[in-house]
Image (tube, helix red, strand yellow):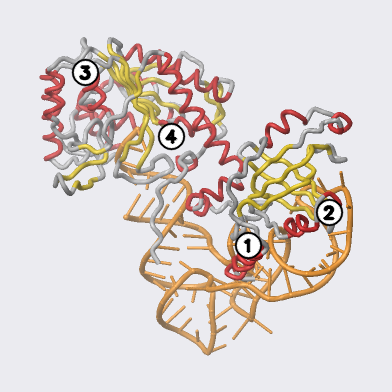
Amino acid sequence: MSEAEYIQQRKEKAAKLRQSGGNPYLHGIVPSITAWELHHLYDARTTEELLHITETFSVAGRVMAIRAFGKAAFLQIQDRSGRIQIFLQKQDISDQLFEHYKMLDIGDIVWFEGLVFKTKTGELTVKARDLKLVTKAIRALPEKWHGLTDIEARYRQRYVDLIVNHEVKKTFLARSHIIQCIRDFFNAKGFLEVETPMMHQIPGGAAAKPFVTHHNKLDCDLYLRIAPELYLKRLLVGGFERIYELNRNFRNEGISIQHNPEFTMLEFYQSYATFEDLIKLTEELLSHIAEKVLGRTEVEYQGTMINLKPPYARYTMKESLTKIGGIAPEVLASREKAVNYALSLGDELKSKNEGLGAILTEIFELTVEKKLVQPTFITHYPTEVSPLARRNENDPSVTDRFELFIYGREMANAFSELNDPEDQAGRFKEQVDALYKGNDEAMHFDMDFIEALEHGMPPAAGEGIGIDRLVMLLTNSASIRDVILFPQLKPIRS
RNA sequence: GGGCCGCUAGCUCAGCUGGCAGAGCACCGCCCUUUUAAGGCGGGUGUCCCCAGUUCGAACCUGGGGCGGCUCACCA
């Protein structure tokens, strides 16, 4: 049978139900209990104990299996909480209901009412005395053994993936739980959740290529935000001393196992804190989430055990280059030597004008990052690559900044915020120079932000954590697409 | 964007050296009142991703294209 014939056949079943006065798309159907609740209440009871339960229950869900025996049948139905088995036999119901049952297909959404009992294999089951087709499905579900495994189909038709692949559902439940934990964590510490613009007139707050759109009435281009940072710091000026935003960023760059054009970022800012305070806060946050969501601080990720129990390793970037990267100390002090070293690694420098700091950062990315498997803070990034971070008091060539790496991936980026408007203006100017020299990821000069700093921003530290990557780690997901319900895919061109 | 790999029935897959397009699940019919991938008998699935080419003949070979996966580059 072709797919078209198959759909036609199911449509005819729906039509037949309509002709006999039924409706294949009912509403107002309210089940009295979920599958999980039934298991929770009665799994531990014996067959004899269940005989004395006189309460009837109704459940609703999607038919996932039908095992039929002529005048009786077992069905598995799946609701939001799990699955429950239904037993149905002709002698218990009217001929009309039995005819309705016979027209059910796998994938239909149904409602059953009856008493609970245990089968002779001990499985808790609802013995149907009433049933309704709630919603007719006219397309077939994937087969029951392998489910849907075609990766493209899973992303393009995530709803099917969610129906048939239990692990997928679990991952997104975990994602929701993680995000809830984060909100609870910050709310409990007196942070205020805020929302700042998604559409920016000047893209800022990160080094990235933005998406451009256009506002017709204002007749101006707008950029989907690459980061909320500059708006959040305006709020620090405004007196919201502790804030966080948990929302989407958009970056017009390549798609990979670790990158989706829109991704979820947590950014939080705490006045009167330094990056050192955020190191402790980050350790507390990650171990807390792991404890809450997984019940432990050891996480297995892609076959590697990751321990999220504090304290985490700490190196300055320069220390990491010599101690982990095995780089000779003299390379760190000479631009010429650093350039030669970078070239020897096969690095094509991003720009010929890069200073020592940017080159060392590139060497770091090539030699050290991958080795940071257990949680490790790398501190004191070069000022040159940190245009929004406060300079270190002892060494102005570096900033009071850290990034946290886990499994070789950047998980967090934080720094003591630069609140000196004059220094910030100078940094913006350097960015604009780089922009004119062809670095399309350099920042623009944001005069309004400078004016905000001129009103006085309290000393503060801020941090960004990539939520998708955190969820990947905690759910042992290999690809960012496994933690985003509808990842970006190429359009299908015929 | 580069490299490698993949795309066959609704789903999961097989298809040898170029020779009639296959299986299981799902679906339809019949049997079956405690199954767990229920079982038994019967039924037919189709733009072999698309377009050219080679050939008597292409799912298979060649060229171009599409989509996907992995990877490198970029990035968080």
Report the amino acid beneath label 1. Answer: Arg
Quadrant containing the N terminus of chain A in the rendered view: bottom right
Which is nearer the N-term, disc 1 or disc 2? Answer: 1
Subunit ID for the residue under disc 4: A
Using residue B29 as the reference point, say whether residue A486 is left or right of it.
left
- Whether label 2 touches label 3, CB < 8 Å: no
Q: Which residue is mark 1?
A: A18
Q: Which residue is mark 4?
A: A468
What's the residue at 69%, 45% (across, down)? A77
Q: Secondary structure at mark 1?
A: helix
Between circles 4 and 1, the one closer to the viewer is: 1
Compute the Cα span from label 1 to label 2.
Answer: 23 Å
Q: Which residue is mark 2?
A: A90
Regarding residue A368, the answer to whether it shows in the image is: no
Residue A36 in picture, x, y percent from top left:
68, 33
Using residue A464 as the reference point, say whether residue A304 is left or right of it.
right
Relative to B18, is A337 above or below?
above
Compute the Cα span from label 4 to label 2.
Answer: 50 Å
- Whether label 4 touches label 1, CB < 8 Å: no
Between circles 1 and 2, the one closer to the viewer is: 1
Which is nearer the N-term, disc 2 or disc 3? Answer: 2
Using residue B21 as the reference point, say whether residue A321 is left or right of it.
left
Report the amino acid beneath label 4. Answer: Asp
Compute the Cα span from label 3 to label 4.
Answer: 30 Å
Which is nearer the N-term, disc 4 or disc 2? Answer: 2
Mark carried by residue A315: none
